[in-house]
Image (cartoon, grey):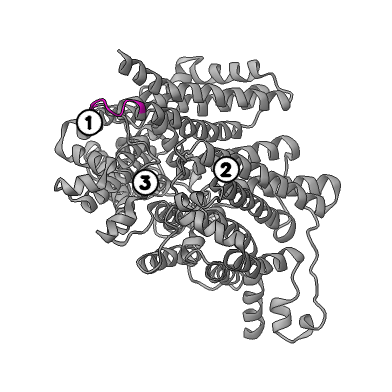
Amino acid sequence: MTPELVIIGILTSGIRLATPYLYAAIGETFGQRSGVLNLGVDGQMLLGAFAGFYVAFTTGSLELGLLAAILVGAVMGLAMAFVTVNLQAEQGISGIGFYLFGLGMSELLFKMLLGTVETVKGFPSLHIPFLGDIPVLGEIFFQHNVMVYGAFLLVPVAWFVLNKTTLGLKIHSVGENPEAADSLGVSVARIRYFTIILGGILSGVAGASLSIALLNVFQQNMTSGLGFIAVALVYFGAWRPWGVLAGALLFSMVNSLQLWMQVLNIPIPTEIAIMLPYILTIVVLVITVSRVRSPSALTKPFDRGE
Amino acid sequence: MRSRLDSLLDALLPVFATFAALGVGAIMLFILRVSPVEAYGALWEGAFGSTNAMAETLVKATPLLLVGLGICIAFRASVINIGGEGQMIIGGILATQIGLTFTDWPGWLVIFAAMVAGFLGGALWGGIPGFLKAYFRVNEILSTVMMNAIAVQVMNYMLRGPMIDPAQAEKASKIPQTARLLEAFRLPRWAPTRLHAGFLIAVVLAILVYILLWRTTLGYRIRAVGQNPHAARYGGIRVRRHIVTALLLSGAFAGLAGAIQVYGVNYRMITDGSASGFTGSAGFNGIVAALFGQLHPIGTIPASIFFGALLVGANKMQRVVQIPSALITALNGLVVIFVVSSEIWRRRRQRQRLSRDETDDAPPSIAENINTSKEEGSA
């Protein structure tokens, strides 16, 4: 295989692999910007991945599968919102609870309803006219499936909503100073419900992107902690969608590189390659945390004091 | 009188939460067309039905208790340690290496050295996030999660490379596992069951952690930092140093759990590529047990036995009514959610008796001062 082909291969699968990180981390960005840390992303992803796969497998419709993942994610988000907003539960720990619930529940349903590892024919690649025909770049960027394009489109959309709309302003104010937002007539609870449910939906979609668009199988614990990385990417990206994109690409590219190293039998321990992005994340956290401020009300429940 | 009623209610909250979770589980079973009575009956039978079942329950409880003790210490300092999985792994690796290296040492010495190595390994793995939190304001939830992922890769690398069983290295299959520990290096067992001395060690340590937290200056300072870092600093306590200490100790207990898992149960390290393959998710379930035990070392003992019983009983349930044991993981998640959600009632009652003296040792309501790192950095 020529070096050019290898490099194109690494970049192409790097773009593909960024998909689940992007959905999950952009969803988490909304939650954190409004002051809620959702640590249950991985559990929501697993349930979304299972729901998407199971419905697509039984009905034969990928669209219905995606819809199921969205619904499951929304229900999980709703539960999380009730627990963190109304019951003011500690967010980090209740997130771990939701993670364990999703982890156990998805495995339980998988074993009871499917029993064995099945496959589906996932979303087909969509060759974009003209752009997809550009040599090299077309292959790297414009010959993916619809879930991949959706993930990358989500970044500018999230940026726009968070920075250029009234809704974004409200989310920001609720995350920075809920008391002030409340006194100005913004419903802290309603905004947080919105961001947490949106986060749940996007986590569900992130899971489905694995099970019906990228890998096209469901296995127990198939995310293997990807949702936790998504949470870290939000810090990594300093609560900005473009920063999250950079982090997601870093992770997916290193991942892709490591997969290709295995394919090409390069004698570097893959464990070290897999480890690198985690170490890098810690280093980046050390560097950025001192410069970038997190939303002031992050992890703090809001009590109107009635 | 009333405050006694209050603390009784506080202590019962997790019990209510568990019944609620089991209730939800019963509904789930019902939907899956399995009789909840039969399923929970099998669960009970599997956990307590025979001497052997009870021994297995205690074997499962041991790592939960050790990790849970570490969680008690960390949470009392308002530090969240989600890194139990990684700390167990590093502790296990170091402890195993001791047993593989010093094969000519007497058994008791190797076991002792291995426990110390496990303790130190976990301390290192918990201390790094502690240091980063105290001095660089890096959120410990994230850094401990990262450290878990790194530890898994360290384990996979060590077991596929430097530490691989020489017998496996020669085979084509190359199962990633170490050689077995010598007979003399194994923790004593209560034959014919698999119950080992590690459980006893854990119970003794629970008492020591209680003494540490409530009868020593260090413990007082750790709790002061957790209750109110500003007041603690005003009182001359070095807040940052105690945050590091709390995570260091917390990791150390998880590391010890890893060492005991090797020397009491498996007698070798083997990896399936994931953290839970070695830990059995004790790093997470230990958090559940500690929360259930009201973040009190002594309360964590029965809590660990309870969750150990659930894990052991789940296997029996799987055999008898064909319900995958993953149900228990899901129920554990619900217990956590219900326990932290029910904290709101405890906080309300606490607020009601605000005027009364603050001598009770209710844990710092976790929600209130977890996010203190920001202010610390600017101070």
- Front position in the image: B359 or B305: B359
- Residue type marked 1: Leu
Give the alpha-carbon distance from disc 3 to disc 2, as whole Å: 19 Å
> Is residue B158 shown left or right of residue B127?
right
Give the alpha-carbon distance from disc 2 to disc 1, as whole Å: 39 Å
Label 2 Cα neighbours within 10 Å, binned few <14 / some 14-19 / many ≥20: many
- Quadrant location of the C terminus of chain B? bottom left
Question: Is the C-beta separation of discs 2 and 1 under 8 Å?
Answer: no
Q: Quadrant of residue A162?
A: bottom right
Residue B279 visible in rendering:
no
| Residue placed under numbered mark 3 in the picture | B370
Q: Is residue A203 above or below residue B195?
A: below
> Is residue B310 shown left or right of residue A119?
left
Q: Quadrant of residue B9?
A: top left
Q: Which residues are magenta?
A: B352-359
Q: Which mark is residue B208?
A: 1
By secondary structure, the bulk of the magenta-drawn segment is best described as: loop
* Subunit ID for the residue under disc 3: B
- Which residue is located at x 25 percent, y 42 percent? B110
* Subunit ID for the residue under disc 1: B
- Which residue is located at x 47 percent, y 65 percent? A236
- Residue type marked 3: Ile
Residue A2, x across and y down, in percent: 65, 85
Element at badge 2?
Answer: helix
Q: Is residue B356 magenta?
A: yes
**Front disc: 2 or 1:** 2
| Residue placed under numbered mark 2 in the picture | A81
